[in-house]
Image (cartoon, rainbow, N blue to C red):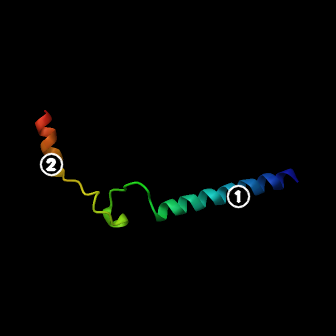
């Protein structure tokens, strides 16, 4: 009887973790660097400007 309870609890935990991972996969909350996946225009970086700032600080 104890084995069945442990198996049931573990099964519920696995299902909850998989649901969380699937939901996170569907709508990531962090920038992945691929602007086409989230449709955001704010994640584009101006690499020329960044390089220039690095050169100026050296």
Q: Give the image quarter of residue 28.
A: bottom left
* Secondary structure beneath label 2: helix
Distance between mark 2 and mark 1 Cα atoms: 50 Å
* Secondary structure beneath label 1: helix
Q: Give the image quarter of residue 51.
A: top left
Q: Quadrant of the C terminus?
A: top left
In front: 10, or 28? 28
Which residue lies under the disc numbered 2? 49
Residue 50 badge = none
> At 50% across and 59% down in the image, what residue appears?
24
In front: 40, or 24? 40
Query: Seen in the image, is 11 located left or right of residue 27?
Result: right
Proximity of marks 2 and 1: CB atoms separated by less than 8 Å: no
Residue 55 in the image: state x and y as whole percent.
12, 39
Crowdedness near tag 1: few (<14), some (14–19) or many (≥20) residues, C-alpha within 10 Å: few
Furthest residue toward right: 1
Which residue lies under the disc numbered 1? 12
Residue 30 in the image: state x and y as whole percent.
41, 54
Residue 11 in the image: state x and y as whole percent.
71, 58
């Amino acid at each position: 009887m104890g084995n069945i309870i442990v198996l049931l609890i573990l099964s519920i935990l696995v299902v909850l973790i998989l649901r969380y991972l699937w939901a996170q996969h569907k709508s990531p909350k962090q920038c992945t660097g691929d602007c086409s996946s989230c449709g955001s225009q704010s994640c584009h970086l101006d690499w020329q400007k960044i390089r220039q700032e690095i050169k100026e600080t050296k």
